[in-house]
Image (cartoon, rainbow, N blue to C red):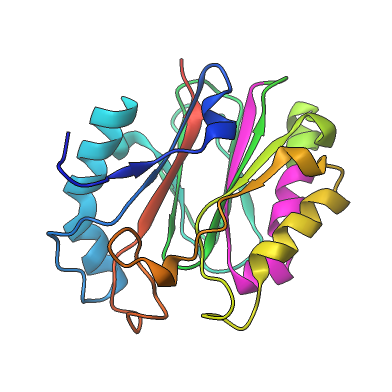
Amino acid sequence: MSDFPDLETFPALSAVPGLVHGFVLRHPGIDVRTDRETALERLRGHYQATARDRLDVAFDEMRFGEQVHGDRLAVCDEAGGPRLWPDVDGLITATPGEYLGIYVADCCAVYVVDPARRACGLVHSGKKGTELGIVPRAIGLMAERYGSRPQDLIVQLSPCIRPPAYEVDFASQIRRDCEAAGVPVDRIHDTGACTSRDLKRYYSYRVESGQTGRLLAILGWRS
């Protein structure tokens, strides 16, 4: 285990039997003052080690979306499906052993979990994605594909940028959208943490002028 905080977990999700989740934090020893792709490559070893050692997840076998700040979603239930889905900002699965990944650095990673049907979704939702309603779209797709009922869901928002550091409170809108979709208020959880206020723990695209790393959200069901 590293000598710095490398993974954050959330109590509401930790209480769900069989669910695997985590939020991989900033690595203090890796220079990420570069473009996104170079930063992700430099961080690959950190992601691999943390996923393996803390969650028993093989990073190189995870499913990712390209993340274009849109509202497209992918269903990750077919064996042999792509590891990287083009033009996709959200992923859902009900297949044990399929682990979903989303990168963020001020945007919100939204974990949507259905303990009743053992389905889950992981969504990249910043200002644009929230305006497009990607989280309620994910809730709707989980209902369509798996029979998930909003009242059974648990929703967890990751740390993200918030006012006054950012002019738009998209986290608040995500919470309202989930409530409007039928998720009970007491099953919608938000850390309240602002990524811009703790650069020892988080990366912040805005504060670091776009030259920074990415936090990694992981979600799936144990086989």
Which residue is painted at 61% across and 26% down in the image?
Answer: 94
Magenta segment boundaries in residue numbering: 118-140
The mark total stands at 0
Query: Quadrant location of the N terminus?
Result: top left
Residue 53 visible in the picture: yes
Check residue 191 for magenta coloring: no
Q: Quadrant of residue 80?
A: top left
Does residue 133 show up magenta in the picture?
Answer: yes
Q: Is residue 186 above or below residue 117?
A: below
Q: Please name the residue shown 80% across and 35% down the image.
A: 143
Give the left or right position of residue 13, taking residue 63 as reference: right
Task: Kindly identify the residue that appears in the image at 20 percent across and 38 percent down.
Answer: 49
* Residue 88 found in image quarter: bottom right
* In the image: residue 165, left or right of residue 6: right
- Picture coordinates of residue 19, whole percent (x, y): 52, 24
Give me the residue at 59% from left, 33% from top.
12
